[in-house]
Amino acid sequence: MSAISREDVAHLAHLAHIEMSDAELDKMTGELGVIVQAIASVSEAASADVPATTHPIALTNVFREDVVGETLTAEEALMNAPDSVDTRFRVPAILDGE
Amino acid sequence: MNEIIRLSATELAAKLRAGEITSVAAVQAHLDRIAEVDGGEHGVHAFLHVNTEEALAVAAEVDAIRAAGGAEAEALHPFAGVPIAIKDLIVTKGQPTTAASKMLEGWMSPYDATVIEKIRAAKLPMLGKTNLDEFAMGSSTEHSAYGATRNPWDLNRIPGGSGGGSAAAVAAFEAPLALGTDTGGSIRQPGAVTGTVGVKPTYGGVSRYGAIAMASSLDQIGPVTRTVLDSAYLHELIGGHDAADSTSLNEPVPALIAAAETGASGDMTGVRVGVIKELQGEGYEAGVQARFDESLEALRAAGAEIVEVSCPNFKYALGAYYLISTSEVSSNLAKFDGVRFGTRVLPTEGPLTIERVMGATRAAGFGEEVKRRIILGTYALSAGYYDAYYGSAQKVRTLIQRDFEAAFEHADVLISPTCPTVAFELGSKVDDPLAMYLNDIATIPANMAGIPGITIPGGLSEGLPVGIQFLAPAREDARLYRAGAALEKLLEDKWGGRLLDQAPELSAATGGVA
Amino acid sequence: MTSHIDELVDFDVALEKYDPVLGFEVHVELNTKTKMFSAAPNVFGDTPNTNVTPVCLGLPGVLPVVNKTAVEYAIMIGLALNCKIAERCGFARKNYFYPDTPKNFQTSQYDDPIAYDGWIDIELEDGEVFRVEIERAHMEEDAGKLTHMGGSTGRIQGADYSLVDYNRSGVPLVEIVTKTIEGAGKRAPELAKAYVAAIREIVKALDVSDAKMERGNVRCDANVSLMLKGAEKFGTRTETKNVNSLRAVEHAVRFEIERHAAVLNSGAAIVQETRHWHEDTRTTTSGRPKSDADDYRYFPEPDLVPVVTTLEWIEELRSRLPEPPAERRKRLQADWGYSDAEFRDVVNAGITEQIEETIAAGTTAAVARKWWMGEIARLANAADKDVIDLGVTPATIVELNSLIEAKKINDKIARQVLEYVVGGEGTPSEIVEKRSLAVVNDDSALGAAVDDAIAAMPDVVEKIKAGKMAAIGALMGPVMKATRGQADAGRVRELVLEKLGLAG
C-alpha cells in the first residue's frame, strides 16, 4: 500500500468538494498518513475466497407498494432553502462565466 | 436535589400512574435541574436545545388524560409523561436539529424521525436535544461545533462520544431517559464513562429513519438510561418494524422488559458467559481490568458458567471499521452542500459557481474530524484503492461475523470491558485521532457484525466509572437484558445502591463539583 | 479542451474511409404511480417542488425504499429485450456532486443489473434485419430539473444562476445499454433512429412508460467512434447526451460521424468526452466538464437490500408481456395488407400504434396509411419534427376522413385543415366551421361557375363533346378558382356533363 501524498489529498479534497488551504492540506496529509499506516493490515487480513459483507444482517426483497403517500408542501420543501425563487431552489451559476 | 430527578424512569412512571406526582412537576424538576447544572462556563453542557414549552405542554396533556381517567388514560403508554432527551442527530419537527455541526445551524426538519413519532405517540415529553461529536464522529463530544460536554463525575473529563450529551444528561439527572445512536460505540462508550446504561440494539431492531446517517450499515438508535429495566422499556417503545427503513427487521420486538425482570433476580444459573480473550489485558487500564474481573466473579458466584472464547480477527476490526464507516460517511455527508438546506458559504474570491460555493460551504460547515473522515472515506472508495481498502474491510466484516458465530457456539452472551480506559481529560486526545479511535476498540466489533450490545456500570476506578459490556447474537437482545439486569443487581447489592449514588453533587453556584 | 473543427467531412466521404462503431444508452422513465425510492407521485408538469417527500430532497435522516412495481417493470423490459434476469442483484451509489442530484450521489445498479445479455432485432429500410445486442438493463433514479437563468441562450453556458425543481428527482429509470454495435456502415444514423424507435415501441407496448420523447420519458445517449476501414482497434468515442427525438438521434449520429472524420483527417485526436446535442443548430458541443467524471466511487448502497428474483415471479411477469413486437408486426402487416416497404416505413416512422388506433376507430388501412405516411409525414418534415410530436391524433384523422366521406370537404381542403390542426386551431370540424371551408354543394352557385367556365373555354367544350373526357380537368381550374377551392370535384364533373347534355 502506497503512502498518501499531498497531491492525493488535494485530489480527494477536490472530489469531496471541500476547499482546503495549503496549511490544511499539509496537516491532513500528515494525519491521514498515520491513520492509513495504522489500518494497512486490513488489506492483508482476508484471503480472496472470503466473501464481502455489505449488510450486517442479510435481508432481501424489501419493497414498497406503488402507492402515493404524503408529500411535503412547497413551503415545507423550501423552508430551509438558503436561496429560492417562487417554489424553486436557486443556486449560483454551474459553469464559470468564462 | 429534588428527589423526583433521582428516580429511575420506571419508578417515576409508577408514581405518575399512581397519581403521586404530575408529569408537569416531573418535567419542571428536570428543566430546573438543566437550568441549574447544564449552562455556564463549567456546566455539563449536555443540551444544545431545551424544549421547555412543548415538554410542559405534553406533560400537561398526559396529566389531563390521567386526571380524566377512563379508556384514554388506560390506553396510555406506561411511560407516558416521563421526560426524555434526544440526541441531536435525530430529526425532530418543531425543534432545531444540528448534528452538532455548523452545517445545520438553525435547520428545522419538516419531518419527524420514526422513533420520534413513537415517542410522541407514547406521550413522553421531550426535554430537548443533546450534544454530540459533530455528525456523531468522535469519542469525547469534544468535536461538537457548539462546545464540549463535560462528564458529571469530573467536569474536567470527557463524557465519551459521540453521544456524550445523552449520557451526561442521564448521569447528571437532567433526564431519566435519552436516545442515542451507536455506530462504533457512541451509546456504549459514553455509557461506560458516565456510569450509565446504554444499549445498541441488533442492527435493524430500531428504525434508522430520521437519524442523520453517519455510517448506514453500522448506525443504530438505542436507549440511554440509568437502569437496565428502563432501557428495556425504552427499547421496546422505539423498536419494531418500520416500512420506511429497508434494513428494518420485519419481526416483533423481543420481550425485553420480561428479560430484564427475570435478570433482576440476580440468578445466572445455566447462563454461559464467554470472556473474549482479545478484549482485555494489554491496553486495558488496571482499574478497568480489576472491575471486569470482579464482575466475572460475581457472575460466577451467581451460577453463570464462565468460558473463554477467542475472536482472532478482532485485531483487524478497528481498521476495517474506519474504512467502512468513513467510506459511508463520505457519501452520506455529500448532501450537505448548501443547495437545499443548511448553511451556504460563498467563496471569498474568484468566480461564483455552485461548485465553488459547495467547496466553501463544506470547508466552513464541517469541523476537522468530519473533514478527516470524509477525506479518508473518499480515499478508501477511490479508483485503484477500493479493493485494498473498502473491499478488504468488508471481508474483514465477514471474518468478524464468523468469529462471533464461533464464540456463540460456546456462550449465550459474551462479556468484555466496554472501554479500555476511564474518562480521560478534556483536550488530552483531541489532537491525536488514532488514540481517540482506540477508545472504541471493544465496542466496534458489535457494529461490524450487527449484533446487540449493552453497557452497564461496573464500578469505579480512581473515582471514575468503568463499564461492562455484554454482547449477544443478532436478534437475541433479550439475552443482554437478562444478563445485564442480573449483573446490575449483583453489583448494586454489593455497593448498597446505584453507582450514580456515588457521583459527586453538581452545583451551579460553584460551576463544578460541590 | 477539444480540437475545434469548423468544417465537417461529408457523410459519404467519411464512410469511404471509416467504419462507424455505435453504442446506445437509452434511459426510460417508468410510469409507476410513485418514485423509485419514495412514495412521492411520479407526475410530470406540476408546480415545482410539490411532488417531493423528504427522500426526494435528500434531507438529513431520510432512507430509500424500493418501489416493487418499478422492479417488476424493469424485469418486464428485460424479458422483452430477451435478457437474462439476475437471480440476485443490488443497488450502488454513484458519487458525484451536482445540484440536480439531491444526495450528491445517484442510486443505480451500476455493475449489478437486474437484466443482462439480451438482443433486439431492428429492421432497416433496405429490409435487412440488424441484431443489436443488449449488454444490460438496470434500474436507477432520475435527477431533478435545472433551469438556467440569465445569459442569452438559456443554456448552462453564460447563465447567471440556475433554478432547481426536484419533482423529477427519484423518478424510476431503466437504463438500457447496448453492446458495441459494428457493421452498420452508412446506415448507422438510420439504425440509431430505428433502434430508439424500437425501444420506444417496446416500452409503450409494455405500458411501463409513457414513452413520450418530447417529455424526456425516453432519452438516448449515443456513443460514436470511427475506426479506419480494416483497423482492428476501436477509435476514441464520444457520448452525445440526451438526444430527445428520433430525428435528433439520427442527426446526432450523422453529425458526430462527420465531425469525428474531420478531426481524424486533420491529424488530431478525438477527445473522449460528453457532447451536447443542440436541436437548433443540429450540432454537438463539448459537454459539461464533470470534475468527478473519472471517479464515481461506486459502492454497494448500504440503505437498500438485494433483490432476489424467483422463477415463479419471473414467469408471472413474463405472462404479463404483450405480444412480442416482431410477431405483432407480422400480424398487423397481414391485417392491413401493406407491402413490406410500406410497412417498414410505418415502423421506422414510429407510428404503428397511431395507424392501428386510426383503423380501430373506423378508417380503412389504406386511408390511415395515406394520411399518416403522406400529408402528416410531409408536415412533420416541414416542421422538422417527429410525426408523433405534431399533435395529430388518430381521432383527427378519423374526423377528417368522415368529413371527406360526407362530402363536406374535399381532399385538398382536408390537407389544409390538417395544417390548421397542426397549427393548433382545433379539431377538423371546428376548423371547417370557423374558416368556412365546407365544400360548395349549392348547385346554383356551382352551376353559375360551371356556366362561366363553359362560356369562357369553347375549345375545351368541343374536345369534351368529341369524347375527350380528360379535358374536363381544364374546366375544373376556373371553377375551383371561382369557388375558392371549395367545390366538390365530383359534383363539378356531373354538372359539366349535365350542362353539355352528356349525362347519363
Image (cartoon, coloured by chain):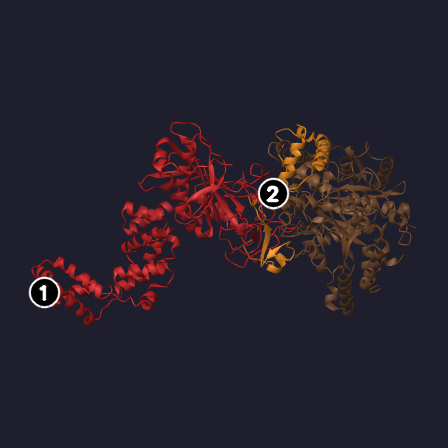
Outermost residue to the bottom:
C444
Q: Is residue B325 visible?
A: no
Task: Identify the secondary structure beneath mark 2.
Answer: loop
Q: Is residue C288 above or below residue C167?
A: above
The amino acid beneath tag 1 is: Leu
Q: Nearer the viewer, residue C302 or C105?
A: C105
Q: Which residue is mark 2?
A: C301
Examine the rendered structure and indicate whether residue C431 appears above or below residue B158. below
Q: CA distance from mark 1 to mark 2?
A: 86 Å
Q: Which chain is red?
A: C
Classify the position of the C terminus of chain A by image quarter. top right
Tell me, yes or no, whether the two marked residues, 1 and 2, touch with CB atoms within 8 Å: no
Viewer-closest of C417 and B321: C417
- The subunit letter for the residue under badge 2 reads C
Q: Chain of mark 1?
A: C
The residue lying toward the viewer, choosing from B369 and A51, is B369
Q: Quadrant of residue C24?
A: top left
The residue beneath circle 1 is C502
Q: Please tell me which of labels 1 and 2 falls first in the chain.
A: 2
Q: In the figure, C261 relative to B241: above or below?
A: above
Of all chains in the rendering, the one displayed in orange is A
Q: Which chain is brown?
A: B
